[in-house]
Every structure is written in structure tokens, then in C-alpha cells.
Amino acid sequence: MADLGANIIFTPFCTDERQGYLRVRYCSQARAIENQVYTVIAGTVGNLPQVENMDIQYAQSGIFSPSDFSFPRDGIVEECSPNIETVVVGDVDLEILRRQRKAGNVTQLKDRRSDLYRLTWTGKQH
């Protein structure tokens, strides 16, 4: 998606345990670094005992950045406390993202060997 112009990738999720949440989080942070994009994860929290397979949920929503000098040191723009219904608000600067893609410490997008693969898009473009 970054090759097609994405600057932010949103990932809604629903997990019932911390390990499931950590898989979503670590993959989201990896995508932020690999693709020089911001990523946002938003999970469901709370109990729904009357709904089969959704009786317990575990989440901690957050906003992540690529790990480079112009971004937060740990790549976390903002995150909420685990398992508390919260709205996460954080500032993302698309201009810093653009500059880092051109001349950052690591320039994955610029240095990709796109001659070795081909992108295929099957969805509708708006």
C-alpha cells in the first residue's frame, strides 16, 4: 500500500488474549518500519458474555511511526492503557514522513528493488 501512496495504515482488530494482541501490535510496528508509514491499531475491549466467541476481549490501541531520528525514539506516537475504553489521539506529521522517505537514516522505499517484483492491485481505485 505504501508503494501505491499510503501514508497511514489502519488495522482494526479483535483478540481475546494478550498474545493475540501482541501479534497485531508487533506486526503493525514492523509494517511502519518496513514501509515508512504510520500505523494505527484499534481493538475492541470489554466483555460481551451473551455473544459466542466474543465473551472476553483484550486490546491496547495505538499509533506507531517508523523508527528513525525524526520520530519518537521507540516508534510509539501514542497508545492507551490496556483494556480500557479510550480514544487515542496523536499527532502525525506527513511532511516529516515525506522527508524521511527521501533522506532518512534508512530509506527502505527509495532503496526497494522493484525490478525484482511486480505489484498487482485487484481492488477498485477511487
Image (spheres, grey):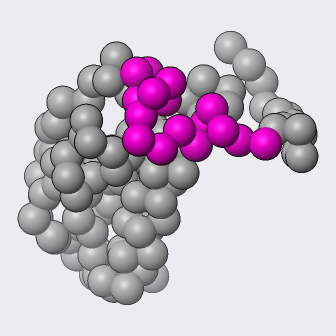
Q: Is residue 48 left or right of residue 83?
A: right
Tell me the quarter of the picture where residue 110 sits: top right
Residue 14: x %, y % from top left: 41, 67
* Residue sitting at x 45%, y 27%: 103
Image height of 49 relative to 32, above or below: below
Q: Is residue 11 left or right of residue 48?
A: right
* Residue sitting at x 58%, y 43%: 108
Image height of 26 relative to 117, above or below: below
Q: Quadrant of the C terminus?
A: top right
Q: Quadrant of the N terminus?
A: top right
Residue 119: x %, y % from top left: 84, 38
Tell me the quarter of the picture where residue 120 sits: top right
Q: Is residue 9 visible in this depiction of the protein?
A: no
Magenta highlight range: 98-113
Image height of 48 relative to 77, above or below: below
Which SS type dominates the magenta stretch?
helix
- State yes or no: residue 116 in magenta: no
In depth, the one of 13 and 56 nearer the eye is: 13
In depth, the one of 53 and 33 nearer the eye is: 33
